[in-house]
Image (cartoon, coloured by chain):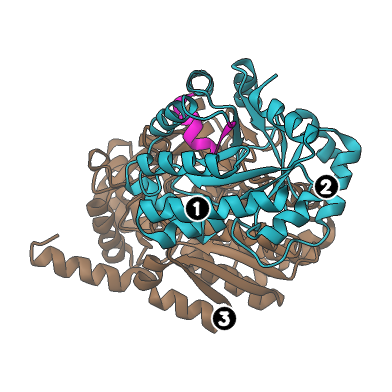
Chain colours: A brown, B cyan
Amino acid sequence: MADVPGRFGEYGGRYVPEVLIAALEELEEAYPRIAQSSTFKTELDGLLATYAGRPTPLTFARHMTAELGGAKIYLKREDLAHTGAHKINNVIGQGLLARHMGKRRVIAETGAGQHGVATATACALLDLECEVYMGAKDIERQALNVFRMEILGARVHSVSSGSKTLKDAINEAMRDWVTHVRDTYYCIGSVMGPHPYPTMVRDFQRVIGVEARQQMLDVEGRLPDVLVACVGGGSNAMGLFHPFIEDDSVQMVGVEAAGEGIESGRHGAALNAGVVGVLHGMRSLVLSNDDGQIFEAHSISAGLDYPGVGPEHAHLRDSGRATYVTADDESALDGFLYLSKMEGIIPALESAHAIAHARVLAPTLSSDAIVLINLSGRGDKDAPQVRDLLAARRSGSH
Amino acid sequence: MGRIESCFSELRTREERALVPFVTAGDPNLSATEALVLAIAEAGADLIEIGVPFSDPLAEGPTIQRSSERALRSGTTLRGVLGLVKNLRSKIDQPLVLMGYVNVFLAMGERNFAAAAKEVGVDGVITVDLPPEEGELFFDSLIEYEVDPILLASPTTGESRLAELADKTRGFLYYVSRTGVTGARKEIAAGLEEAVSMIRRISDVPVCVGFGISTPEQIAEIGRFADGAVVGSALVDLIEAAETPGPAVVAASEFVAKLKHALR
């Protein structure tokens, strides 16, 4: 089954209204043909190097390593990529693809606004029209990112259906796509959605793992023992993991958002607490009740606040090649503060979940072990929220 | 012969077209839906589509989205909808078709759902987000229990795929009239007649046209070339505007009678 295009074990596929089948078939044909052409590769590599700031550095986390007293810890610095997160890798790839396919109108969904800002950025660069769907609740919570998208020339549509968050923004983007399918390119932000998106977004994010693998060999002369990355939809984790899949000695650990605790029901942990279901065009693990209704995810980090997960992660979980753990809101907030003080790097609250797990993991390993954390984004965007959370902590009302 | 097939064959004999109203089950509650379906069956509906509400209805426009939200707020579940069909089946003869999203059906299990649907008297199932290449187990289970899996085709469907869909569907083929979501529109989509004629040349399966159809004039136009027309959002709009179930039933039956008149 794993060899069928678009299938990862029992997951993946293409669960969409009939209107979209032709568009997905067009994309499935165009993507490999265009992406493998030397013109495309030259353009993409050029933009990643001269525009997005790649390769991003590998940083040895000296103080964290010393303080935790176990494995050596390295950070893959996606926070230093343009727009402050790994999202740019994917949108430059898909933006170029849209241009080559002759589609000048690009739509995207966004939760916290990171993928929306990245898409608006790529569209400004590549001279494409950009419209972004965002839940009404998220627009309120992330006003600054809405403004950034508008500065970059994008139109932001407020989505007030359903739970008014990311999952509803995806529904609305799909509705737009169904309506304007002939001239519109849908730029999905993670390794999710109908085939070929999970494969395509993974391929555009693999650059993270390809670089990190070589950088580890250059610095340490060997591969790391454990990779750690946060998982919402799962694009930064998949980008890091995928080039290491054949390296059996390398463990891969994804960290999901436990939110207020798995038992509270308020979390974003589809791999740890989800069921097999169909959402947003894919068969994967989803947060769904006994009647098949999707429930709202919760996390301190808007980027992990999604009730599904990319189908390839579900497959890696089942096959045992990767393991998936969780970190809750409190430990993520602690991880945010910890990395800031220890290394002078303010991580995104998403990435802070990976930091939180590494703090538990590293002390259990010997000093010659190596842990590589994907620092998927920087935390400037989270500063106002963290200020409020800390104020609440101090007054004891959290 | 299944109830849907007999329905279309009788209509063809009488040179009539099928009026297919859509209502969301449980909007605003299941007993109101039961009264509503009984009334529109009496008013002239030939076949009735009953929407199973879903939290993430990505092919629906605002009207049906709101309707699904009201239904979920009143606690409507798939089991509840099956109970509704059971009650209706003992009272009316028209074919009853469920329309919904695959996650809700899968949550019950393909075969369990097919068996339960058969038992209560569901005649067909339309799954908005399950193309045939992903739905083999589900559609085979339905066929095994003599429930018709009704497939959709759209303006972006190419000719060879149209032939495949026309071949695999049971009961009728649901032709989506436009690229877009559900919702009442002023104009019929351009090229609709040509598209339906193309299906006619390939297959003799009945074709019902839906999405965006809201007036007796549009219905009459579609009746010239298709076997039936689905009216959903325009009906749901009336139900929403009526605010309470009593007047909603009256408004809906008057509307359905008018639409059916246009098809005779």
Which residue was labeled with disc 3? Answer: A152
Q: Is residue A184 left or right of residue A346?
A: right
Q: Which residue is pictured at 27% across the width and 40% down the height?
A: A262
Which residue was labeled with disc 1? Answer: B252
Contact (CB < 8 A) between labels 2 and 1? no
Q: Which residue is pictured at 48% across the width and 43% down the height?
A: B39
As displayed, is residue B78 above or below residue A237? above
Q: Could you say which disc has been placed on residue B78 in the image? A: none
Q: Could you say which disc has been placed on residue B196 in the image? A: 2
**How far apart are the two marked residues, 3 and 2, measured between alpha carbons?**
44 Å
Q: Which residue is pictured at 80% across the width and 55% down the height?
A: B192
Report which quarter residue B226 is drawn in: top right
> Circle 2 — which element?
helix
Q: What amino acid is found at the position of numbered circle 1 in the picture?
A: Ala
To the question of a shared chain for discs 3 and 2, the answer is no
Viewer-closest of B246 and A360: B246
Q: Position of residue B77 (x, y in %)?
A: 38, 36
Q: Quadrant of the N terminus of chain A?
A: top right
To the question of a shared chain for discs 3 and 1, the answer is no
Q: Position of residue A191 (x, y in %)?
A: 56, 48
